[in-house]
Image (cartoon, rainbow, N blue to C red):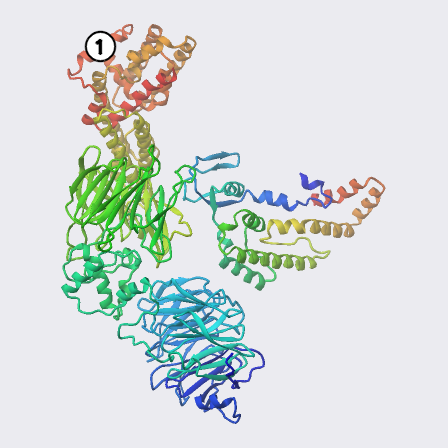
Amino acid sequence: MAGQSDPHLSIFSPSEVEFVAEDEIVEIVPNIRMDALNMICGDFGPFFPQIPTKVPLWLAVALKKRSKCTIRTPDWMTVDRLTQVLEAERESPREFQPLPFHYIEISKLLFDDARDDISDAYLVRSLIEDIRDVRFHKVETGLETISGRTHAVKLKNLSAMEVNIVRPFMVRTLQAFYKHDSPQMIQQADNTGSRATPVTDRGPRRDLRRR
Amino acid sequence: MKGRVVKLREAHKAGSPALCCASWGPSGQHVVTASAADTAVLIHDAATVLAGGRGSGSSPVVTIRLHKDGVTALAVAPGPSGSLASGSMDHSIKFYTFPEGEFQSNVARFTLPIRSLAFNRKGTLLAAAGDDDGIKLIATIDNTISKVLKGHKGSVTGLAFDPRNDYLASVDSIGTVIYWDLCIGAEARTLTRVAPTFRSDNSVRNILCWSPDGQTLAVPGLRKNVVLYDRDTGEEVCTLYGDHEQPVSCLCWSPNGRYLASAGLDRQVLIWDVKSRQDIERQKFDVRICSLAWKPNGNALLLIDVMGRVGIWESVIPSTMKSPNEGIPDLNSTKAPLFDDDDDDDDEDEEKPSTSGGLEDDMDETLSDSTPFSHKRPRRKSTFDRDSDNEDLTHQMESTKRMKDKHNKKEDAGKARGDSATSARLVTARMQAAFQPGSTPPQPGMRNFLAYNMLGSITTIENEGHSHVEVDFHDTGRGPRVPSMTDYFGFTMAAMNGSGSVFANQCKGDKNMSTLMYRPFGSWAGNSEWSMRFEGEEVKAVALGAGWVAAVTSLNFLRIFTEGGLQMHILSVSGPVVTAAGYEDQLAIVSHASDCLPSGDQVLDVKVFNISEGAQSMFGRLVLTPLSQLSWFGFSENGQLSSYDSKGILRVFSSQFSGSWLPLFSSLKARKSKDESHWVVGLDANNVFCILCKTPQSYPHVMPKPVLSILHLSFPLASSDLGANSLENEFLMRKLQLSQIQNKMEEMAALGLDTTTYDDEAFNMEAGLDQCILRLISICCSGDKLVRASELAKLLTLEKSMKGALTLVTRLKLPLLQEKFSSIIESFLFQERMLNNKIIAGTGRFCSNATIMTSTTVLTTQATLPSKFMQDGNSSLESSLPKPNLVNQQCSSTEPKNSAGEQGIEIKDSTGKVSSAFIPSTKVPKSSETKKHRNGASNSAVVDQNQEGDIDHTGAKKLSTEYCNRAEPQRPVNPFAKSSSSKEQSSSLLDSIKKMKVDKPNSRI
């Protein structure tokens, strides 16, 4: 994986996460008649004008770029729903509201390519940004509470992009705690210290997995 | 600046800017003020306020300190013995006497602060709203909440009763204006985001104000202006745009409606002459003015600013101009129009209080304006008329208009204005007016559909005397691109299909005759559009099909033109037309058969013409749900006549029971929530395509583009004790489709056409039906409905599925059924055998599996086949043929096992020999494999024949001749014609299989 060549452990770049998000299913209203498309990922269509169909986001965007369809805004991307979510996010500092796993990426793709299909686009965009900020802030404050005795951190409803951002930090933190806690690890680290650095890097990870 | 500076005097102490309000007493002697920063409501003497600038010792007449928090809203009830209402941040509303200011009662309590209050003109109703999600209407007589109007998304900051008491207008902090119909207590119109948005800023608020004649509603606009909206249509009448540098926050009409005062966030107060749309006076203040009020009986304006300082602007209107009190509109007399537009005249017609509804009057009206429904007024379309005069249908809509006038002041006027046929309420029913399927009522300033079908849409919008018509295809990839058209005729009806569009208008007076126009989408000749004009006649409905255009007129003439404009036929139809629809060469016309029944049911006839043949293929009564009207009519995608009524029932015409209407869809059952309705666009064999509409809207708007939803057709089944309604429905649907296909095949066969294209379809349909029946049988068995199960088994058409049923009951250990089923199979096999004999006899060319060796076609193919196929053919033939025989042994319990075994051997022998003699084609085994379920029957039949006829295997050709000799002498020219007429579906299936066998080798070669 491309991510593993990254110095920060297995982090995906935002564009990679976005790529993954393009498999999410959205609803489009085609304005052409087209036979079903048989893809490796599944069969989509047939397409009839003015009759909504569900397709993966990448296909929707591709069709949209050729102005062959309009993309229907997902339910959660309405001003009403987002306002509710934002309020709920603000009210409950300890938990996250359920949103699609790829909500940041989907909204970004839709704003880039299907802006005219979104009603109140400006408002929706600012709401999503607000929600994202609130959630990131929550994640950050949550990370502060991690201590040596933390065995697991339960983060329900965290989205892909958010996970991706905290992942390297979390892993490294837990590793660091683990390393400092376990005398054997310290020894091993000492032993391997003279060897090549990549091995040192991998050593603790393997042990972490075994546990 | 004129140098007259209005001095303001502090009435309420406010540390920071807070929303204040001020109001005149009804007599103009007192002034009431309140501030959101102060708990007190003050009643001042107007004179002291006026002098307030100079003298400082004056104090308010009455101080009321009953609220626990700042007072945000005030309202003074009109009339000499007025009362005062105040609403506060402490969530309560209180009533006081006026001008004494004695506390009377606590009226209502909200859960959140109150932002706005308004009395209606008579003071009988108080509307109150605020941050809560509903506007409460409170009857002042007993302080009961008579209605809660919900619909605003933001907090409601402005309320105003229409002086005519038909509407309440409200505006919220996000700028949405809603007209509420007070009669039905529901939204009549919503204008979203028309006023500025003040989300959380409580020191600014949107307000709105009705003109004193009730004709226009003034709302602060988004562009530092004041926008005036029409009372009935909600369209923008004009804007007052001038020197406000920031959005307008507050406005007020002068008592006569000639002038309007507006205060903006730029701290200016402007006085507008509404007629000339210009500001005539202005004044700039130190802080923002947040409330304005015209003196009810003088040339003075009461102002209060956000710091709680109050003042009166004396002689606002210069003496050179008309006084603001001159010509206060009297709502009981004919009002003077504010704007001299056509629009207004139209309104006037409508709003004019009724004079006598005599006959002479009718005649005048019909002569002067004979449009059945004006293209400007959407609501008139298809509302029911309550008039009891017996008029011609042509005059129906005029009388509707008159009736509305009559009822205008009555409470139910609002109800009569139902937006469409679906919301119409019947008192005395009227014959339904003509309509065009797929059209929506026109709305001023907005596009509406003239036609909307599965192919595309025709939309129109009126703009300065002429309309703009656009034709769009849903499928932008394929449909031709049609340039938009400027329409000087004012077309009100249209129809389209893939090759062209037809338009027509109603005549408006003598000058504008009814015109019919056809525009082909593409033609080999240039300029091939044409138009026809009708004198003294009016087009009521149009339709078009393959190569023809039809128009039905007010004289009940059906005029049929060719695509090129040739007048082909002119027929008289039996009654006033309701609608027409075309599909290929079929034209269906719905007309009134008689006046409505006393119960209110429409009496409609439907006729279907075949244009190319010049024949009438169907005539009958159009079935409607009681008390409903026809709201859509047309052909389904596969040419079935269908209708949809205002009660939401879709019916499809079927030839079952020699022609009957089947209810196949109910909007009421299909809808997910109560406020949903379906606007039908079209249907195919399984689904209905419709546009979902939310009440109060019962038809779609052009923008945003409506999206079709697909709903399954289903019979209105009674809920049976079986608990498998969906399966039962599937069963009925499949049966219907099968019968439709068989009908089509019969028709084709009768015409001597090739039915092969439908054979596969029919076979699949039968298989599907059998599958469904089998599932039903299993449910019946588990539900212990054995009789029903055996009835179902009789309906099975394929032998394979019968055996399936037998296995099923054997597994379920139901010996009774097992017996029944095997006897059914037996009789089926017997029938099949008889049938086989007949067919073999009748059709020398088409033979089933075992006799295929005799088939001439196969013989020819055999000759051409390469020899490498031969061996394959041989081996698979031998391997596949015995199998069905084994099955045969199992199922046919009547035949002794020995003989069955012998037959099997014999067959094997025969095939072996025949193959050596005739070199069978590869196709033979293949088809025998695919149609294994048939093999049993045909094999056994053939074997019998073999035995009886005592035929040796070497002469297979003799075999066929023998059959022919032994069978009945008559030999139909067309084998299909015979099978379809003499025997039921099984024979046609057999044909289909044989046909397939014959066809496939041919196609391969």
Q: Is residue B429 visible?
A: no
As rendered, which of B517 and B179 lies closer to the eye?
A: B517
| Residue at which label 1 appears | B961
Indicate whether A145 appears above or below B478. Answer: below
User: Could you tell me residue B738's position as x and y percent?
Assistant: 28, 34
Name the image quarter holding the C terminus of chain B. Answer: top left
Element on which disc 1 rests: helix
As rendered, which of B717 and B144 lies closer to the eye?
A: B144
Say whether residue B15 is left or right of residue B587. right
Q: What is the quadrant of residue A96 in the picture?
A: bottom right
Indicate whether B197 appears above or below B496. Answer: below
Identify the residue at horizontal 27%, vertical 53% (top origin).
B646
User: Could you tell me residue B693's position as x and y percent?
Assistant: 36, 54
Q: What is the quadrant of residue B495 in the picture?
A: top left
Label 1, residues with CA under 10 Å away: few <14, some 14-19, many ≥20: some
Identify the residue at horizontal 47%, vertical 46% (top origin).
A70
Say whether residue A60 is left or right of residue B592. right
User: Could you tell me residue B377's position as x and y percent?
Assistant: 30, 59
Mark 1 chain? B
User: Could you tell me residue B563's position as x and y percent?
Assistant: 27, 36
Inspect the image, locate mark 1, and give the three-letter code of the amino acid beneath it.
Answer: Thr
